[in-house]
Image (cartoon, rainbow, N blue to C red):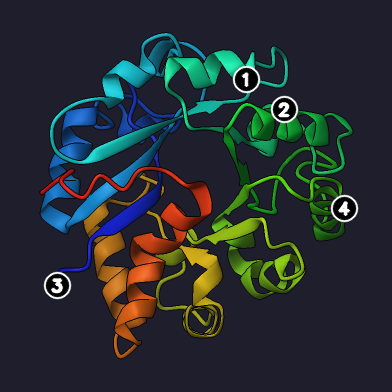
C-alpha cells in the first residue's frame, strides 16, 4: 500500500448502525468506519446521510461526525418532500447536500432541482448528485440528456456527480467536460465492476481526466480497504502528483474544505 492518503467521497455511517439494505444492519456504525479508514489510510470522508431521521437525524448527525482520527465531513440528505433550510444546514456544520433522484423520486429534468442546487451553492454547500442511471420509476432519474440540461441550468454551482453514471462512465465524462464546476466521483463504480471491461474505461478516465476525478467507496457497500486496493490497482505507474490529486487533492481544491493535515495521523 502506498502512503498517499485518500479522501473517500462517499460513506454513509448511521446513528443506529443500519443501512437501507438490511444485510448491513448493525454494521454501519461510525466506529467501524473510522477503524476501517485508519487501516486503509483513508484520512477524510464525506459522511453522507441517506434520510432525515432515525439513523441520519440532521439535528445530531454533525456531532456524531466529530471526533478523533479521520475527518468526517457531514453531508445532509435533501428530502424533496420537505426541502431543508440550506443556511441552517450550513450553520449546523453540514458542508453539502445529497440529492438522490431514485430514492427521492425526482428526475434530472425536475424544475425544482436548479433552484435547490442554486440555494445550496448560495449557502456554501456543495451538491452531491447521484447519477446512477437506472431506476424502477419512469422518468427517474432520467436520461443523460436531462442531466446535461440540469448542468447547463446550474452553471456556477459546485456539483459532484456521484458514481459518474456507473457503466455509462465515459458518456458522463464527455457530457461533463464543458461544465468546469462539476467533479466526477468514482464511488461504487470503482469497486462494483471490478474485472469487467469497465476497468479499461476507469484507467482511461483516471489517466486522461485525472484532474476532474475523485474516488470513494460508497460504504458500507464497499469498505475503505476495497477503495484502497482499487485505487492502488488502477493508478499504478501514474505520475505521483496526479495520484495525489485523484486521491484527495481534487476534492479539496474543488470544495475549498480545510485539509487539516493532522487529521487521522
User: Relative to 68, is 141 on the left or the right?
Assistant: right
Query: What is the CA distance from the residue labelled 3 to the residue labelled 4?
Result: 41 Å
Residue indicated by mark 1:
86
- Give the class, few, some or many, for how many residues have Cα within 10 Å of label 1's Cα (few <14, many ≥20): many
126 or 237, which lies in front? Answer: 126
Going from N to C along the chain, the mark reached first, 1 or 4, is 1
Q: Nearer the viewer, residue 216 or 95?
A: 95
- x then y, percent, for residue 245: 39, 69
Q: Residue at x 86, y 35 (%)?
A: 110
Q: Which residue is mark 2?
A: 119
User: In the image, which disc is placed on residue 149?
Assistant: 4
Q: Nearer the viewer, mark 3 or mark 2?
A: 2
Q: Nearer the viewer, residue 260 or 196?
A: 260
Residue 1 is labelled as 3
Q: From the viewer's perspective, is the residue at label 2 or at label 4 nearer?
A: 2
User: Residue, x 33% and y 54% (percent of image)?
Assistant: 7
Discs 3, 4 touching: Cβ within 8 Å: no
Give SS at disc 3: loop
Chain-order first, disc 2 or disc 1: 1
Labels 3 and 2: the sequence-earlier one: 3
Residue 69's x, y, as percent? 14, 38
Amino acid at each position: 500500500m502506498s502512503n498517499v492518503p485518500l479522501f473517500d467521497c462517499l460513506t454513509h455511517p448511521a446513528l443506529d448502525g443500519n443501512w437501507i439494505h438490511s444485510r448491513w444492519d448493525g454494521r454501519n456504525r461510525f466506529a467501524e468506519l473510522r477503524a476501517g479508514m485508519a487501516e486503509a489510510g483513508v484520512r477524510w470522508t464525506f459522511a453522507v446521510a441517506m434520510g432525515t431521521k432515525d439513523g441520519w437525524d440532521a439535528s445530531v448527525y454533525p456531532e456524531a461526525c466529530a471526533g478523533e482520527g479521520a475527518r468526517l465531513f457531514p453531508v445532509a440528505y435533501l428530502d424533496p418532500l420537505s426541502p431543508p433550510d440550506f443556511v441552517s444546514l450550513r450553520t449546523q456544520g453540514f458542508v453539502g447536500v445529497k440529492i438522490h433522484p431514485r430514492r427521492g423520486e425526482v428526475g434530472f429534468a425536475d424544475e425544482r432541482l436548479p433552484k435547490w442546487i442554486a440555494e445550496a451553492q448560495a449557502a456554501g454547500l456543495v451538491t452531491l448528485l447521484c447519477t446512477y442511471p437506472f431506476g424502477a420509476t419512469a422518468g427517474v432519474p432520467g436520461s443523460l440528456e436531462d442531466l446535461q440540461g440540469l448542468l447547463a441550468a446550474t452553471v456556477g454551482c459546485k456539483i459532484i456527480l456521484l458514481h459518474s453514471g456507473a457503466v455509462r462512465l465515459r458518456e458522463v465524462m464527455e457530457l461533463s467536460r464543458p461544465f468546469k464546476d462539476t467533479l466526477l466521483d468514482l464511488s461504487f463504480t470503482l469497486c462494483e465492476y471490478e474485472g469487467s471491461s469497465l476497468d479499461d474505461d476507469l484507467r482511461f478516465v483516471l489517466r486522461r481526466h485525472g484532474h476532474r476525478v475523485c474516488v470513494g467507496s460508497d460504504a458500507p457497500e464497499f469498505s475503505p480497504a476495497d477503495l484502497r486496493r482499487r485505487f492502488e490497482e488502477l493508478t499504478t505507474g501514474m505520475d505521483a502528483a496526479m495520484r495525489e490529486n485523484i486521491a484527495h487533492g481534487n476534492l479539496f481544491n474543488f470544495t475549498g474544505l480545510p485539509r487539516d493535515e493532522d487529521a487521522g495521523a
